Amino acid sequence: MKIEALLVDLDGTLLDTVGDFVAALTPLAAELGAPAPSEALVRRLIGRGGAQLLRDLLAHWGLTVQDFEALRERYECHYRAVNGQRARLFEGVVVGLEGLRALGLRLACVTNKPQANAQALLERFQLAAYFELLVGGAQGLRAKPAPDSLLQACAGLGLPPARCLMVGDSANDAAAARAAGCAGVVLLRHGYNHGEPIEAVPAEAHLDGLDQLPAWLSDRAFLCPAAGS
Ligand SMILES: O=C(O)COP(=O)(O)O
Ligand SMILES: [Mg+2]
């Protein structure tokens, strides 16, 4: 088995976006009369998409709202206004993407973040050119840990999931990769995993950063595409 493409998560994998989430949630909390969420709390909640994040936060505050959809829309509006302003690239991302490209691997970005926000982030951080396609959160696509967005990315690449390896930062990425039938999953240690140690999530590898991935792949002939093939 050799892999031909990587499906790469966004939040917690390419970009540290926790500051954007806090900035979007702070005015929403004020509207609801709830305390501003701390960065540590938000870090534990990121990764299952915006709707789940809001449900988890409401549960944390002990609040219920009559019109959840309206709340979600207000949150998305706050988020769009701050998207990227506090985000930063994780160390090793560009070196890692360059190395993966040099190995001849095709890249797709697969995130629970709404498509437009994800696209804007890839452009803002000059990452867009590395990716053949981006599958973000959209209506009709169940968020990871469901396999929907990964399957859509594989279809877009024209590859069976067994030729694709998922790279992410959370148990959701691992579960989505298994459910989609991907070749495996590599997890990075610098992201968000709901407050749990990432090492507890079974994976083909746990790495400190994306810059370690090309060498890890090169050491495994079954995962590395034959040069020039
Ligand atoms: O939960 C989100 O909104 C984003 O999460 P992801 O980029 O790690 O999939
Ligand atoms: Mg993530």
Image (cartoon, grey):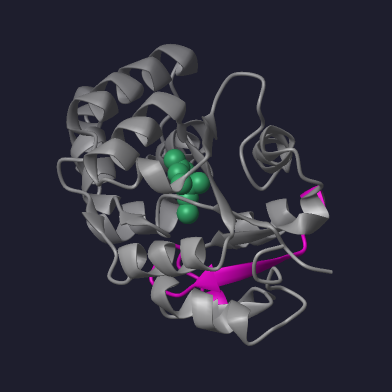
Q: Tell me which corner region of the image, top left, top right, bottom left or bottom right, holds residue 117.
A: top left
Residue 61 vertical placement versus 18 (above, below): above
Q: Quadrant of the N terminus?
A: bottom right
Residue 220 vertical placement versus 167 (above, below): below
Which residue is at a point 39% across and 25% down the rendered structure image? 116
Which residue is at a point 67% across and 20% down the rendered structure image? 140
Comparing 63 with 223, the one in front is 223
User: Does the magenta stretch mainly form a helix, a strand or a loop?
Assistant: loop
Comparing 18 with 83, the one in front is 83
Q: Tell me which corner region of the image, top left, top right, bottom left or bottom right, holds residue 4.
A: bottom right
Residue 38 seen: no
Which residue is at a point 27% across and 70% down the rendered structure image? 91
Q: Tell me which corner region of the image, top left, top right, bottom left or bottom right, holds residue 138.
A: top right
Question: Would residue 60 be found to the left or right of residue 134 on screen?
Answer: left
Q: Position of residue 17 (x, y in %)?
A: 29, 50
Residue 157 seen: yes
Question: Would residue 92 be found to the left or right of residue 197 on screen?
Answer: left
The magenta stretch is 180-199
Residue 196 lies in the magenta-colored region: yes
Q: Position of residue 103 (x, y in %)?
A: 55, 68
